[in-house]
Every structure is written in C-alpha cells, then in structure tokens.
C-alpha cells in the first residue's frame, strides 16, 4: 500500500501563498539570445534563437544542461527556422534552403526539399500544404508527403509567372482537403479547395461574378462542421459567408448592413457554441463584438463597448476560467481587458487606470493562471491573472530593465506547467526566461471550507467522488501537487463525478474544482 509521511502532511498545513521564481537561460553571452516560435514536441521545447552562429534551431527540456542548439542549419549565416508543425511523427518547419524536419536530435534534423515555403504549413489528407514560389510558376499551392520526391506544386492555378496565392495566404484543413483563396487570373481572388491532386484542385464558387477583383475570402474558421469566412460581392458588400466545400453549400450567412454597405466581419473565434467576431452594424454603433449562433441562425451585436458611434472593436485573446477574454476600447479606459461569461460582458481588468491603454497582448494559460503583457503606465510588463479576477505584475528580483521592447512582439508559452518567454530584464540582453509558480493555490482561501462541494473518501487510494450540493454542474477538476504541478485534469459536465486516482503517487494534493458559477479548492490525501 502507498503510504504518506507526517512530514508531507505538515507541508500542506504550512503551505500558503504564491511561491514563485524566475530563471535566466542566457546562451548568447555576446548579445541577445532572442528566442521565439516556441513549440512543444516529444517532451522538449523547440524554438529558434541566436548565438555566434546566427539564428538557428534550439531545444530545451527546461533545465540549463538540457538546453542546446540542435543544429547549425546554415553555416554561412542564419537559417531562421519557423512555422513548426508535427507531421508523421517528426516536426516539420521552414528555414533557409527549404523545407526541413527534425526529431529533436542533430542527426535527425535534415532538409526535406529545396523549396522555400512562404508562411505556415497545414496538414490535411496525410499531406503538408503550403505556399511556395519559383521564377517559372510564381507563388502557388504546394504539397509534401515528407519526402523530396513527394514535394511538388499541386497546380499552377494562375498559369505562367503570375501568383495565385500570397506569402501570407491562409490555408485551412477541412474534410481531408484544404480551403483557401486563390486568383486564377480570370475570376479574381475567389474560394478554392484541393485534395492534393491537380484534378482535385478547383474553385468552389465564384462569389463575386462582377469584375476581376473577386470576393477576396479571408479569416477562415471551422464552426459546427462548416468553414465560415468573410467575403465580398457587389450586392451585399463584405459580409459573413459559410461553405461545406461545394458550390451549392457556399452561401451568405447574413447581410448585417443595408444596401451595398459592408459590416467587415473579422477576428473570428468559437466560444460557448457560438461564433464571435468584430463587425459593424448599420445602426451607427461602430465596430463592436458580434455573435452568430447556428441554432438561432442570426447575427447580432453582443455589446456596445464604445457608447454611440465610436468603435470599441473586438480582439479575442484567450478562453480562461470558462470565459472568453478579449480586448476592446472606450475613451474612459483606453484598450483594456474584457470578459464574456455566462451571457454577460464586463470590463475584467483596467491595467492602466484612466484613459491610458494597458493594451494587453500575448495571452497564455499556464497551470490555473493566465498571463499576458500589458503597459502599466510605466513599462510594458508581465502580468499574472488568477480565477478571482486579480492581475498582478511579476518580474525577477534581479530585474533592472523594462522587459519587453515596444517594437518586438511578445510570445508566452507554457511548457511542463512553467511559463517561458523572452525578456530584457537584465543587462544580459533579450534572453530566455522560465517562470515557475510553485503553487497557485492557498489553503487560507475561504473556498476550502465551502460546503457547496462534497468529496469522499479522504484519504483515498483508488478513486474519489465529488458532488455539487447546489444546482450547478461541475465543469472541471484539476489535481496539483503541493509544489503546484498539475498532474491530472478532467473536463466534465455533471453534478456528481467519480474519478480514478490510482495513478497518483502517495502524497497530499490540492484539488481545484470548477463549477458553472464558481471555483473551489480542496485538500486530498492519497494513500
């Protein structure tokens, strides 16, 4: 039988607050390390970074000794690896010289084909799809099966040297095909699809049949089994459309503005069974958050952040604690953080009080916290946000500089329940930092004593049952060690659940239980 020591029990009694630490990973002593494009693959974190050899491919397991350059892909300069995507058990990416792949080792990192993909890679129908160009065909749709022989142009959609796609063209996977916008030189930029064969690459529908400008489809997103996007035609302007990949199944969802005016839908995100986006209605309320729900089959403005004709905008950030967080603006607060939860929309955090914008960006969930970059009135800083709705600025004790360059986008990434970022905190430069939260939970919180949640048995060795005593369902349960490491999480939607804990080691755990209306934390002894 698993046993638990008295020492472990005492640990949970004295444990309280947010013990936290920052660790610097400086592997370029002569300048900025500049890590970016973090990607988790096979238990390691892969990214690009800079040292004396230039910008190359690096990895870390979260330790100093486990951090190293995988390979110098371009001995004559920088290779700039990016656009990482898992495919057939290895990680593919773009870099100087062509399409590459890696298994995380030097010997397992090699070039696939000497074609240079432009933009992101998309996996569909057991193929990699991307945009690439040459002097003969211009920028067109390409594919790869992961081999040099199997990497080729799918179709010269716009014959000759003219481009049918652009370097930033969005390609979305859908039903073993890809959907994208392309210009064949006749119809303008219209809606296309491909299964990876020349014969199976075709225009789905000529949405705007007047002139050569095309309908310019963009902002593709899958929702309820179909692809939604914005497109323009001469009758309706730029509005919300959907497609199932067929001409007859491609149709206008709703003309959200009268006559030929445009609502210009953009920034789509799926949340709580609905499609949210920013758009402009025809009632002179500016650009605000809108919602389309398939059940009601209607588009409606959700909230008017900026009262009157001004535009509050809507920039979806992240889903956290059962809410959709986004940024919007109004004169009184500037650009700040809002949340939509349980049918209501409120200002969540005014990072910089008054009319100055906090402008939160670079959102990331890690453990049971949310992190983001924002301006606090003095500097662009890192903030930690918890389920109670409190945002706290955090930084290393050794910090002497403003951490984030205004002109440099910030990227936050959660790996092994620790936060990774590039920051300019000290004189060492713009380097890799790891932020460890030893615990995100406090036993002094009154929620521990709440009788709204019952759990038994405790101690336990095989399974526990958790019951909500009120009318709300349990949405999620998460088990943390006393050092704050997440070891088990389940998403549920029931009033009572029974969960196996057979795989947990003997010890004391903090169990965070989220319901439809609140969050509770309990202490569990596993024998």
Image (spheres, rainbow, N blue to C red):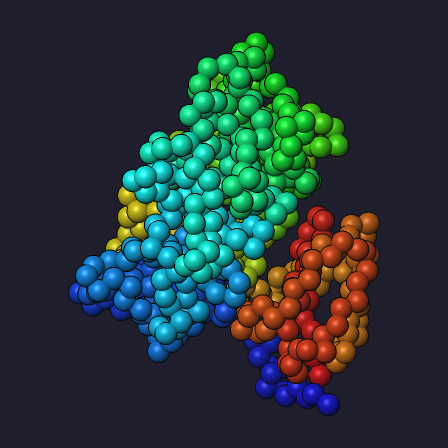
Q: Is residue 467 left or right of residue 263?
A: right
| In the depicted structure, whether residue 318 falls above or below residue 414 | above
The answer to which quarter of the image holds residue 448 is bottom right
The spot of residue 428 in percent (x, y) is 23, 63
Horizontal and vertical percent for residue 294?
71, 32
What residue lies at 58% left-to-right and 31% top-to-bottom?
A: 204
Q: Going by the picture, which residue comes out furthest to the top?
A: 259
Which residue is drawn at the image coordinates 45% and 28% (left, top)? 184
Front in this rendered view, residue 329 or 132: 132
Residue at 67% over, 29% down: 249
Q: In which quadrant is the C terminus drawn?
A: bottom right
Question: Taking 344 as reference, is 176 above or below it?
Answer: below
> In the rendered view, does 431 fall on the left or right side of 414?
left
Q: Say whether residue 352 is left or right of residue 322.
A: left
Q: Is residue 151 visible?
A: yes
Q: Is residue 324 visible?
A: no
Which of the 4 image quadrants contains residue 34? bottom left
Q: Quadrant of the N terminus?
A: bottom right
Q: Who is closer to the viewer here, 412 or 389?
A: 412
Q: Position of residue 282 (x, y in %)?
A: 56, 14
Q: How many marks?
A: 0
Residue 288 spot, x, y in % from top left: 53, 26
Residue appearing at x 43%, y 53% in the figure: 151
């Amino acid at each position: 039988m698993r046993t638990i020591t008295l020492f472990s029990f005492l640990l949970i009694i004295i444990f309280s607050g947010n013990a936290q630490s920052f660790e610097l990973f400086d592997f370029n002593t002569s300048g900025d390390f500049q890590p970016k494009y973090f990607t988790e693959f096979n238990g390691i974190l892969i990214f690009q970074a800079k040292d004396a050899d230039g910008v190359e491919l690096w990895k870390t397991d979260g330790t100093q000794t486990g951090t190293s350059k995988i390979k110098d892909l371009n001995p004559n300069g920088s290779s700039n690896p990016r656009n990482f995507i898992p495919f057939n058990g290895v990680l593919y990416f773009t870099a100087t010289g062509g399409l590459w792949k890696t298994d995380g080792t030097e010997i397992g990192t090699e070039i696939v084909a000497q074609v240079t993909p432009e933009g992101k890679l998309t996996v569909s129908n057991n193929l990699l799809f991307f945009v690439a160009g040459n002097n003969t065909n211009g920028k067109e749709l390409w594919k790869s099966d992961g081999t040099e022989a199997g990497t080729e142009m799918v179709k010269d959609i716009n014959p000759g040297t003219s481009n049918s796609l652009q370097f930033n063209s969005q390609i979305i996977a859908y039903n073993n095909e890809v959907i994208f916008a392309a210009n064949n030189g006749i119809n303008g930029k219209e809606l296309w699809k491909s299964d990876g064969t020349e014969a199976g690459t075709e225009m789905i529908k000529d949405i705007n049949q007047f002139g050569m400008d095309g309908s310019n489809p963009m902002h593709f997103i899958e929702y309820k089994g179909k692809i939604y996007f914005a497109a323009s035609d001469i009758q309706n302007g730029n509005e919300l459309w959907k497609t199932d990949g067929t001409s007859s199944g491609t149709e206008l969802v709703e003309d959200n503005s009268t006559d030929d005016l445009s609502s210009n839908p953009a920034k789509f995100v799926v949340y709580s069974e609905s499609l949210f986006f920013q758009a402009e209605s025809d009632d002179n309320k500016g650009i605000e958050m809108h919602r389309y729900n398939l059940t009601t089959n209607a588009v409606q403005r959700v909230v008017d952040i900026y009262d009157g004709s001004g535009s509050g905008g809507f920039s979806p950030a992240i889903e956290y604690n059962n809410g959709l967080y986004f940024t919007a603006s109004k004169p009184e607060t500037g650009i700040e953080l809002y949340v939509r939860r349980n049918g209501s929309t409120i200002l969540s955090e005014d990072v910089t009080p008054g009319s100055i914008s906090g402008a939160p960006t670079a959102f990331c969930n890690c453990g049971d916290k949310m992190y983001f970059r924002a301006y606090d009135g003095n500097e662009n800083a890192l903030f930690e946000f918890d389920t109670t709705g409190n945002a706290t600025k955090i930084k290393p004790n050794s910090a002497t500089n403003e951490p984030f360059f205004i002109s440099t986008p910030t990227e936050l990434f959660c790996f092994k329940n620790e936060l990774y970022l590039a920051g300019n905190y000290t004189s060492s430069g713009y380097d890799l930092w790891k932020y460890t939260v030893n615990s995100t939970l406090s036993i002094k919180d009154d929620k521990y004593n709440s009788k709204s949640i019952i759990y038994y048995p405790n101690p336990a060795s095989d399974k526990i049952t958790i019951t909500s005593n009120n009318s709300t369902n349990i949405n999620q349960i998460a088990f943390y060690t006393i050092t704050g490491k997440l070891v088990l999480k389940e998403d549920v939607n029931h009033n009572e659940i029974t969960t196996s804990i057979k795989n947990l080691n003997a010890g004391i755990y903090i169990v965070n239980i989220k319901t439809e209306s609140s969050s509770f934390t309990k202490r569990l002894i596993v024998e």
